[in-house]
Image (tube, grey):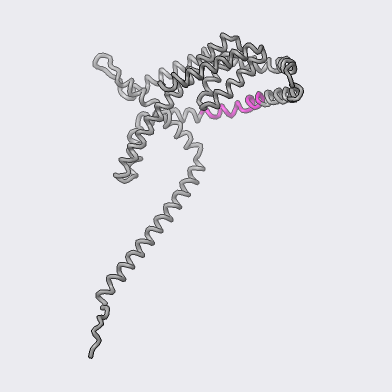
Amino acid sequence: MTDATPTPSSSTSLPTSATVTVSSVEDRRVVRRHIVFAFAVVVMLLVGYKLLHVLEILYVSALFAVVLMPIVKHIMKLRIGKWSPSRPVAIILLIFAALILLVGFFYIGLPPVLHDIRQFSIDLPQRVPAAVAKIKKLPLADKLGVDTLAQKTEDLAGSAAAYVFASAPKWVGHIFDVATAFILCIYFMLEGEHAYAYFLAFFRPESRKRLDRTLGTAEQRMSKWLLGQGALMLILGVCSTIAFGFIHVRYFFLLGVLMGLMNIIPVAGGVITILLVGVVAALDSWGKLAGVFIFYGLYVQVENAYLTPRI
């Protein structure tokens, strides 16, 4: 009597073995791809760290190009008869307008700022004792260590002035970086679309479309946010300069410019600057200090309730 139990043949065992072999080979390929990808990411991070300064210039240039491109497009829509400016002509007109604004600022706005800085450095050693005498009249002033605080303030002011003068040559060295960023910004405005398309070509078609939509949305939101923030900085700077001048705060032009510039830092920038303005106002009288804080309180309410939602 023969055994009827079927025995596995070689024809049925080979496909299973081949499938296992193919699966193991594919797994090894996936592992190798992950290892190579991780190694490439590490190498790119190291290269990026070494080229951090260059990448910063590229980032700032691209950022300004993103912000200025809507203005360039609006200029290109202008029509004089049948003529409308091309992109190069629009960029040249924008640069010309920016140069006029910069020359106007350096000719009109910079001299009062420099005068206030020089006057502040001269007046500070003379005004600190008078301010200390005023503070000592307050209750519990002796427990605050006013004399020690005044000495530290004078030392800090002297150190800050020495640092500014010592670091002036270093700032001159950044002129080359500014010129490089300026040239790259013009290049991005002229050829940015071609460079952007070349960048997207490295991705698969299905990922390319999704990345294009995401970057397009980011570009619109970033440009609008920067333009809006610049408008708020300008409004705060102008209003602060007028208000401080009306209250007769010393160095009102310098302090107004600082208020506008520091507004780029949300919340903290305005608070720090208004405290500085309060200290300067308190050196003259408590009434000026109250006027400064009343102005800033009213402006914050107007900005939060009216300006920010609309801008």
x, y percentage for residue 45? 48, 45
Q: Where, quadrant-wise, is the N terminus in this rendering?
A: bottom left
Q: Is residue 102 left or right of residue 81?
A: right
State how many labels appear. 0
Check the image and report above or below for 296 versus 8. above
What residue do we see at 33% from left, 21% from top? 74
Query: Based on the displayed image, in which of its 4 quarters is residue 112 positioned?
Result: top right
- Which stretch is magenta? 160-175
Q: Is residue 16 magenta-colored?
A: no
Query: Based on the displayed image, in which of its 4 quarters is residue 290 positioned?
Result: top right
Q: Residue furthest front?
A: 139
> Which sits in the foreground, 180 or 112?
112
What residue do we see at 75% from left, 25% from top? 143
What residue do we see at 51% from left, 17% from top? 299
Query: Based on the displayed image, in which of its 4 quarters is residue 254 positioned?
Result: top right
x, y percentage for residue 126? 72, 15
Q: Is residue 263 left or right of residue 169?
A: left
x, y percentage for residue 263? 51, 23
Q: Where, quadrant-wise, is the C terminus in this rendering?
A: top left
Check the image and report above or below for 103 versus 224. above
x, y percentage for residue 22? 32, 65
